[in-house]
Image (cartoon, helix red, strand yellow):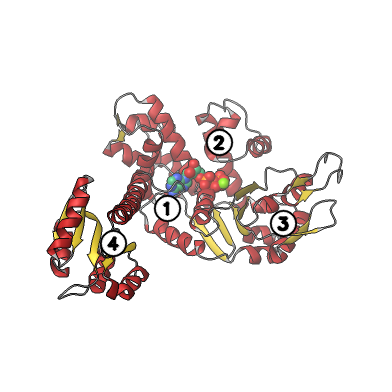
Amino acid sequence: MDAILVIDDEPGIRNTVRDILEDEKYRVLTAEDGPSGLQVLIDETVDVVILDVWLPRMGGIDVLKAIKEQWPDIETIVISGHASIDMAVNAVKLGAFDFIEKPLSIDRLLTAVRNAKAIADLRRENIRLKQVTPPPNQLTGTSPAILAILKLIDQAATSHARVLITGENGTGKELAARSIHERSDRANSPFVAVNCAAIPENLIESELFGHEKGSFTDASARRKGKFEVAHRGTIFLDEIADMSPQAQAKVLRVIQDMRFERLGGEQAIDVDVRVIAATNKDLAAEIAAGRFREDLFFRLNVIPLHMPALRDRLEDIEPLAARFLDELSAKHHYFSGEACQTLRQYPWPGNVRELRNVVERLVIMVDQAEIGPTAVQQVLGQEPIPGLNPGQAVDTLLCQLMEMRLSDAKDRFERHYLVHNLRRAGYNISRAAEMIGMYASNLHAKIKKYQIEAGE
Ligand SMILES: Nc1ncnc2c1ncn2[C@@H]1O[C@H](COP(=O)(O)OP(=O)(O)OP(=O)(O)O)[C@@H](O)[C@H]1O
Ligand SMILES: [Mg+2]
C-alpha cells in the first residue's frame, strides 16, 4: 500500500498526524526535515505528502519544488501556522494540492488527505490504463518512416492547418486522420468521415452541405450536411480525387470561407471545421489530366502526410501482426521466426488492411499457439510450386513490365494483380474488394474492363 509522508520539524505534529491517519488505516511515514523527507521519497512509494512550510535547513517551498520536479504524481498538502499563511498560499500556486492552517482540525486534515489520495489514485489508474490499452487510434510501427509519421501527426494535432494524406489502399490514412483529431483540441467534438467516392455525384452536395425540405425530388425533410455536423470538430474528406468538378468548386469555397448555404436554402451557415483530406490517387496526375482542381489541391495540401506502403517498411510487420493478434483476443498465438520471414517476403498490395485480414484468417485456421510458415503461405496463396522459386515468376513478370509503355505496364500489372486476388478470394467479388481495399463497384468495373473470367 502506498504511504503518506509527514514532513514536520515538530515531533508533536508528526505524532498527532500519524495517529489520526493510522486510525483511518493509512500507512504513515515521517521525516523531521526536507532532505530526510526527500530521502524517504527515494526509498518508498508515497502518494501524498503533508508538508510544513516552515522548516529548518531546507524551506518548505523548496521541498515542494523538489517534489513537483522529481515526483510530479505525488500530491502535497501544506500545513502552516498563522504567521506563514502567505507562504502556504504561494505553495498552492506552485502546485500544492491544498493547505491547512494550524491548529489542525482533524476533519479538515482527513478530507484533504482523502481528496489528495483520490486524485493520486485516479492519476495512477489513468497511467495504468494508458499502458495497458494504447490510445485506440494509435498507429503501430517501429520503422523510421512510421516514427516520422507519428511525429508529424503530433505536430499536425497542435495546429488547425489542413492536412492532405496520401498513400496506397490500406496504409492507414483514415487511422492517421482519426489520430490527428484525437490528439487535437477538437478531440471532444465530432470526427465526421465522408467517403466522396461512395456518394453518388448528384447527392454529394446535399451530403456535404445539407438541404432544405423540398429542395430536390427526394428531399422530404430538412437535413444537416456533414460540414454542419462536424462543427468545432474535424471533417475527413476521404477519396477526395473522386469528387465531381462541381463539388470540388463548392468545397474549395467552403474551406476558404467556412460559410455555405444548404441546398435550396437562403441562409448562410458559418462553421468552424478542420479539414483533413485523403486520397490513394496521384493528385499531380489527376491535376495534369484536368480531373482535379489545382487550387483545391494547394488549399488542402498545407500539411502533406504520405503513408508509406507496408512493403517499404518491413520492420512494422511484426509489431502490427502482434497488435492484431492482441485485438483479435488471440494473445496466446504467436508467429514463428520463419513465419515472420514469410510475412516479410510478401509484397502486401493491400498493405496493413491485408495484413490484418491475413492475421484474422490465420487465427481461425491455426489451432496450436505457434503460427508457422506453411499456414502463412497457404493464406497468402503463395504455396511454393515444387521446383520453382516463387521469386522467379515475379522477376520474369517484372522484367517484362519494365520494357513496356507505362500505361500498358500499369494495365498489365493491374490485371495480374486482380486475377491473383480474385483467386485468393475464391472469386467472391466483395471479399476480394475488401481484401485489396477497393470498392466492390470499382472492382466490378475493372473485371469488365479486363474481361476477367471467374476461375481464370
Ligand atoms: N500503423 C497501423 N497500426 C495499426 N493499425 C493500422 C495501421 N495502419 C493501418 N491499420 C489498420 O489497417 C486497416 C486499414 O487502415 P485505414 O482504413 O486507415 O487505411 P486507408 O489508407 O484509409 O485505406 P483505404 O485507402 O483503402 O481507405 C484499419 O483496420 C486500420 O486500423
Ligand atoms: Mg480509407
Name the kind of residue labelled 3 in the image. Answer: Arg
Between 209 and 233, the one nearer to me in the picture = 233
- How far is disc 3 from disc 2 in space, using C-alphas? 26 Å
Name the kind of residue labelled 2 in the image. Answer: Glu
Nearer-N-terminus badge (1/2): 1
The residue mark sitting in front, 1 or 4, is 4
Q: Residue at x 58, y 59 (%)?
A: 164
Q: Which residue is the site of mark 3? A: 291
Q: Which residue is the site of mark 4? A: 76
Name the kind of residue labelled 4 in the image. Answer: Thr
Secondary structure of the residue carrying numbered label 3:
loop
Q: Which residue is the site of mark 1? A: 312
Q: Quadrant of residue 85?
A: bottom left
Q: Residue at x 33, y 53 (%)?
A: 111
Whether disc 2's CB lies below 8 Å from ligand 1 is answered no
Can the viewer see residue 169?
no
